[in-house]
Image (cartoon, grey):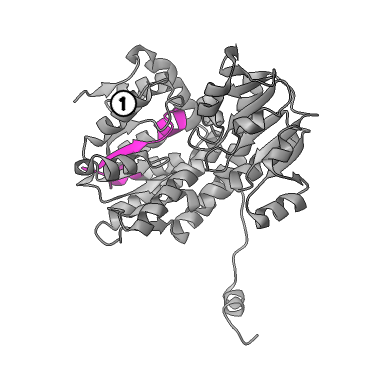
Amino acid sequence: MKQNEIRDISLAPSGRQKIEWVKNNMPILNGLEAQLAKDKPFQGVKVTLSVHLEAKTAYLCEVLAAGGADMSVTGSNVLSTQDDVAAALAATGMKVYAYHGATPEEYDRHIEMALAHKPNIIIDDGGDLVGLIHNAKPELGEEVWGGCEETTTGVIRLKAMEREGILKFPMVAVNDAQCKHLFDNRYGTGQSVWDSIMRNTNLIIAGKTVVVAGYGWCSKGIAMRAASLGAKVIVTEIDPVKAIEARMDGYDVMTMKQAAPYGDIFVSATGCEHVITVEHMLTMKEGAILTNAGHFNVEVDMAGLEKAALEKKETRKNVMGYRLTSGKWVNVIGDGRLVNIAAADGHPAEIMDMSFAVQCLSALYILNNRGKLENKVIDVSDEIDDLVARRKLEAWGIEIDSLTPEQENYLNSWNV
């Protein structure tokens, strides 16, 4: 087994610079790093991580390693790995298997190579580590005590496995923590999606019509930021309650078929497949821009588009144009993959500081409760959420009130 499979170790200095930049903007992880370096709770523990391999993820890896963890690392998307960051991690002696633009076969090999170190704890983003263990390589999971899942799509997969009774070890649903989805999914996705769209198109958002598919936490952030940039926003939904919420938040609500002719920019963030189909594309405006903010590249029907297109050409870096039988061109950013990380730098460091603090503390929870947890999807504890939130406020220099004993008694009494 190779120690590393990366693009080029000589890229390490620029990757180190990126890691140091985010480190200076992640005060919660700074505090955890100092604590873990002192206590070494992960000494002798093998941790395998599969998360979008860029600077913020690299710093999480270094925090865990400071706590004694023996890390093996890979990416969670073929386009989101930054080669200089992967090289910087490898230069520290960490086991790293990832490079940008890997083929699906190479990506699968990297997942398997990372798991070949027989981890005790896994940190997953989208469920690919868990999926390989359960579908093809059960022997690679023989020493797993449990793990953590970063994103909505992965939690959906895990809950399906739990329902079927096949989940082999406990997994903490990091995505469902309040300090994750309320901030990462909403404010992180909301900002980073538009960062990617604007840097890759160099077009104005104000005055355009944006169609947002879904109205979960990610989509709420995307719609909110689109509106703040001056766009008219249309939301499509399958959930009647969320559709009402979108309407009351001030957005038009309609079906994708109805919205397709109006949109200038489309963003799908549903976790489902074929949300935007070729049928929809055929009714779109000339030059419509299609993007996906969900974990897998199936929300925009890329396979159908590739077959239906009469012509295909790169119209700008990270942007592919397709001419349809309608005679019009549509443009897809980042091959229909997770637009904010496949074609940009992902969420801001301050947002990932909270999310990765939850990851770190959840991994510690798995360690401290080894052998005591059922093979189920586990919620992040209120104590972890509270700790991360308080440390975030502390980093901002914000103080909040506390309940007096009398107030606690009042709130816990029925006879008031």
**Of all residues shown, which one is farthest toward the bottom?**
415
Could you tell me which secondary element the residue under label 1 belongs to?
strand
- Residue 331, given in percent of the width and then of the height, sits at 63, 21
Res. 64 image quadrant? top left
Residue plotted at (55% across, 34% down): 347
- Residue 232, given in percent of the width and then of the height, sits at 78, 36
Residue identified by numbered label 1: 97
Q: Quadrant for the C terminus, please.
A: bottom right
In the depicted view, which residue is nearer to us: 235 or 238? 238
Q: Amino acid at mark 1?
A: Tyr
Q: How many marks?
A: 1
Q: Is residue 131 visible?
A: yes
Q: Is residue 344 visible?
A: no
In the depicted view, which residue is nearer to us: 189 or 17? 189
Q: Callout 1: 10 Å neighbours few (<14), some, many (20+)?
A: many
- Residue 67, given in percent of the width and then of the height, sits at 31, 41
Rendered view: 55 above or below 180: above
